[in-house]
Image (tube, rainbow, N blue to C red):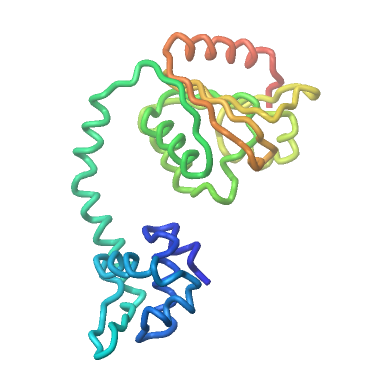
């Protein structure tokens, strides 16, 4: 029932299915687990060992065969909390290693939600003047955590950096929300709508395809280019368009 959610944290698909099967049966034999989870017996044994190693099930030694019991589901939260505490201890050292390696030039593609979050982390980490072209207010998309954008805003405020946004004309229909953001913005004229967005910040030029108003379409991708000369050229292009766009 909840295999998808469990597999989105730190369990594999089979681990999630088997854990839920054992939880529902209580003292479970391998045969019971196989029937309940629809996983072949051959694939169950290795998965059971991994779940035991993760401390979320434990074996009961029986006369004929081992039985397995799932720990209290609260244990999952405890394990995640413990892993978080360990990571927090070493995170400053990992960040230091990353920051020592300055990327001067690169090009790559981000896809799917987790990579979008990575792009926002890049934006927040850099925290420099940021320019959005053909913006469609996609940062209010439900699956984007509010904290990501709040962290970005705070990082810019702390460094006294600005944001300038040139919106797709179709966004005007929600001018009330736009005004509440307190950022500089302008609108492209009618007739220049596109399924495309561009962000420029520091040495980054980031473009999105398959984008609609307030949302992303199914096959969207993020194309990231890191090059100082290229980014400065795009900023100049942005300024030209800014000067010829309608003020709010």
Residue at point 23% right, 25% down?
100
User: How many marks do you count on the picture?
Assistant: 0
Residue at point 68% right, 41% down?
176
Q: Position of residue 132 (x, y in %)?
A: 57, 26
Q: Position of residue 216 (x, y in %)?
A: 63, 40
Q: Is residue 196 left or right of residue 106?
A: right
Residue at point 50% right, 62% down?
4
Q: Is residue 134 left or right of residue 21?
A: right
Q: What is the quadrant of residue 161 in the picture?
A: top left
Q: What is the quadrant of residue 40 in the picture?
A: bottom left
Q: Position of residue 66 (x, y in %)?
A: 28, 82
Position of 33 relative to 134 (above/below): below
Position of 12 relative to 115 (above/below): below
Looking at the image, the residue that sits furthest to the right is 191
- Which image quarter holds the C terminus? top right
Q: Which is nearer the eye, 75 or 178?
A: 75
Q: Position of residue 17 (x, y in %)?
A: 45, 69
Residue at point 42% right, 85% down?
25
Position of 230 relative to 19 (above/below): above
Q: Which is nearer the eye, 116 or 8?
A: 8
Q: What is the quadrant of residue 188 in the picture?
A: top right
Position of 218 relative to 126 (above/below): below
Q: Which is nearer the eye, 55 or 117?
A: 55
Q: Is residue 219 left or right of residue 66?
A: right
């Amino acid at each position: 029932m909840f295999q998808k959610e469990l597999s989105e944290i730190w369990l594999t698909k089979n681990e999630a299915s088997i854990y839920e099967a054992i939880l529902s049966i209580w003292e479970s034999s391998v045969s019971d687990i196989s029937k309940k989870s629809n996983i072949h017996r051959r694939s169950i044994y290795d998965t059971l060992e991994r779940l035991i190693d993760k401390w979320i099930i434990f074996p009961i030694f029986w006369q004929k065969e081992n039985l397995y019991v799932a720990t209290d589901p609260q244990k999952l939260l405890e394990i995640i909390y413990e892993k978080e505490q360990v990571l927090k201890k070493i995170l400053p050292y990992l960040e230091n290693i990353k920051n020592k390696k300055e990327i001067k030039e690169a090009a790559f593609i981000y896809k799917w939600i987790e990579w979008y979050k990575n792009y926002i982390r890049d934006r927040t980490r850099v925290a420099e003047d940021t320019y959005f072209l053909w913006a469609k207010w996609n940062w209010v998309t439900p699956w984007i955590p509010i904290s990501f954008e709040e962290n970005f805003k705070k990082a810019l405020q702390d460094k006294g950096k600005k944001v300038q946004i040139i919106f797709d004309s179709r966004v005007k229909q929600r001018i009330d929300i736009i005004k509440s953001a307190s950022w500089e913005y302008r609108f492209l004229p009618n007739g220049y709508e596109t399924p495309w967005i561009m962000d420029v910040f520091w040495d980054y030029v980031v473009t999105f395809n398959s984008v609609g108003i307030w949302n992303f379409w199914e096959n969207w991708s993020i194309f990231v280019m890191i090059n100082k000369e290229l980014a400065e050229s795009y900023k100049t292009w942005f300024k030209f368009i800014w000067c010829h766009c309608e003020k709010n």
